[in-house]
Every structure is written in C-alpha cells, then in structure tokens.
C-alpha cells in the first residue's frame, strides 16, 4: 500500500484538511472557488464542441463524458474549491472538528465563487466566437442544452442531483486515496465520465451550461439555427430565462447535490470509517 491510502486513511486525511478550509480567508476562498468554476466551465465548453454535431444521444454523451472530466482533474490538482466536492466537509462536521455554521459559511462562499467563475467563462466563450462552429450549430446546441435543463421536472432534478454528487464526491475521495498524479486523474476520470454519460445534474456545470444558453439566445443567428435544427416552436425558447435558470434548475439540483454528497456518501463514509 505504498502508493495509495486506504479509504479510512483518506477519510481521516480529508477531515484533517477541513480545518484549512475553515481558516482560509473569505477573499481567498472565493478566489479559489472562482478558479474551480472556471475549470468546470472550460471542461463543459470543450465537451459541447466535441458532441455538438453528433445526432445519436448515446454517442453525444459518450463524447461529452470523455472531455468533461478534465475540469475536475484541474480542480483536484490545483487545489481549487468546488462546491459539490466540498459537501464532503460534512465528515468534519460530524467529527466535531468544526461547527455547522462554519461548514455552511464555506459552502456559501464557494458556491458564490463557482457561480462567478462559470459566468465569466460563459461570457468569454460567447465573446470568442466559438459558437459559430459548424455554421452556428454549436450555438444552437448550446441553446438546446440549456433549454433542456430548465425544463426538467423539479423532482427529477433533485434525484438527478443526488446521483450526480454521489459520483463526484466518490471521485474526490478516491483521488485522495491515490498518492501519484496518474492515480488521482484516473479516479477522477472514470467516475465523472460515468455521471456525464448517465446524464445526471451538477449545479456548477449547469451554472455554465444554462448561462451559456442565455448568452447564445441573444444571438438571432443561433436562435434561428436552433429553430431549424431542432424544430422548436416560435415560443419554445421563452422558457430559457433567468428565473427558470435559478428556480427550476439550479435550486433543485443544488439541493440534490447537497443530499447526495452529504447524506448519501459523506456521512456513511464517516460512520463506517470512524474509530
């Protein structure tokens, strides 16, 4: 076991590391979270390029799943702060290493930072002209992804968020088990690949995907391409708006991610590995 930690060792290491997160200043914590939001958004943007002109759903998700995990790989190796992974801090709370109020303070600051980072990348990708690929089809595909997310039934969004963060947090703790870079990246890749191919909902990824769709919707050429390519009715895109972004998707998905990361993985890992 020279090149990896047991799960009990990894859990204890993560709990010990929570103290550093608690002590980090708000400004530094938000900045690290902005970086994580940008990294996840860049992985999401690249995955859309890979899959935008693939008609078969399974093949499109397969391509997306190959590219998207790069975002979490960057987060893990750079020490940036990602909201979904930080839900594992509940293990430190349960161990009475910090107070619940301190946990929620960290999560709130990280969530805000992730949102800022995601929005920055969505704006930058819009300004870069990348969505002009394939005669504007990438822009249309960006709108399609966002519209699909804001029209998910809220109950389904919660459950999808739960399943997503079980896998994301498992990837984080498994990456901590590995002592070498290759092991950390492989642990991150395969579990994130699984969540993406399965189509589960990740709040930070959606911060990019839906914001990008809102930016793309501002371009009449992309709207026309989306209407022609996907057969949307004239008023179909009205559902893609800021209210539905925040209330119909981001809220239930965030709740699901919290439940998945804390109740379904974090607390069981803490309980089964405590002394």
Image (cartoon, rainbow, N blue to C red):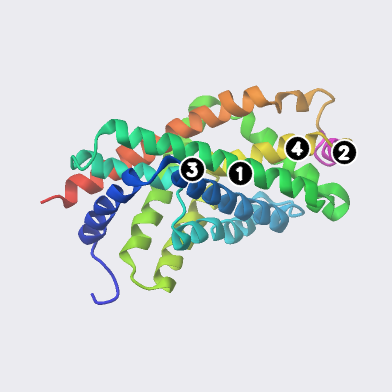
Q: Which mark is residue 215?
A: 4
Contact check, label 3 and label 4, Cβ < 8 Å: no
Q: SS at mark 2? A: helix
Residue 66 x %, y %:
58, 61
Q: Earlier in the sequence, mark 3 or mark 1?
A: 3
> Alpha carbon of mark 3 to alpha carbon of mark 1: how far?
13 Å
Q: Earlier in the sequence, mark 3 or mark 2?
A: 3
Q: How many marks?
A: 4
Residue wearing tag 2? 228
> Alpha carbon of mark 2 to alpha carbon of mark 4: how far?
19 Å
Image height of 111 relative to 42, above or below = above
Image height of 98 relative to 195, above or below = above
Q: Earlier in the sequence, mark 2 or mark 1?
A: 1
Q: Which mark is residue 30?
A: 3
Q: Earlier in the sequence, mark 1 or mark 4?
A: 1
> Alpha carbon of mark 1 to alpha carbon of mark 4: how far?
13 Å
């Amino acid at each position: 076991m020279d090149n990896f930690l047991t799960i009990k060792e990894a859990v204890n290491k993560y709990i010990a590391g929570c103290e550093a997160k608690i002590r980090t200043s708000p400004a530094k914590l938000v900045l690290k979270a902005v970086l994580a939001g940008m990294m996840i958004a860049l992985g999401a943007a690249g995955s859309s390029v890979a899959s935008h002109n693939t008609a078969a759903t399974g093949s499109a998700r397969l391509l997306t799943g190959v590219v998207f995990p790069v975002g979490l790989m960057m987060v893990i190796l750079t020490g940036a702060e990602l909201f979904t992974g930080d839900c594992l801090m509940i293990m430190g709370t349960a161990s009475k290493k910090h107070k619940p109020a301190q946990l929620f303070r960290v999560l709130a600051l990280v969530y805000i930072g992730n949102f800022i980072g995601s929005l920055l990348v969505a704006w930058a990708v819009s300004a870069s002209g990348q969505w002009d690929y394939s005669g504007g089809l990438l822009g249309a595909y960006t709108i399609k992804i966002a519209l699909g997310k804001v029209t998910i039934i809220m109950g389904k969004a919660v459950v999808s968020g739960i399943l997503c963060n079980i896998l994301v947090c498992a990837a984080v703790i498994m990456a901590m088990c590995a002592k070498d870079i290759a092991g950390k990246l492989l642990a991150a890749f395969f579990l994130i690949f699984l969540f993406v191919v399965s189509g589960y909902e990740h709040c930070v990824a959606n911060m990019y995907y839906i914001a990008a769709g809102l930016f793309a919707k501002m371009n009449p050429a992309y709207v026309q391409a989306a209407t022609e390519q996907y057969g949307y009715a004239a008023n179909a895109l009205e559902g893609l708006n800021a209210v539905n972004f925040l209330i119909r998707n981001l809220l239930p998905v965030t709740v699901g991610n919290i439940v998945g990361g804390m109740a379904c993985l974090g607390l069981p890992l803490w309980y089964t590995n405590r002394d």
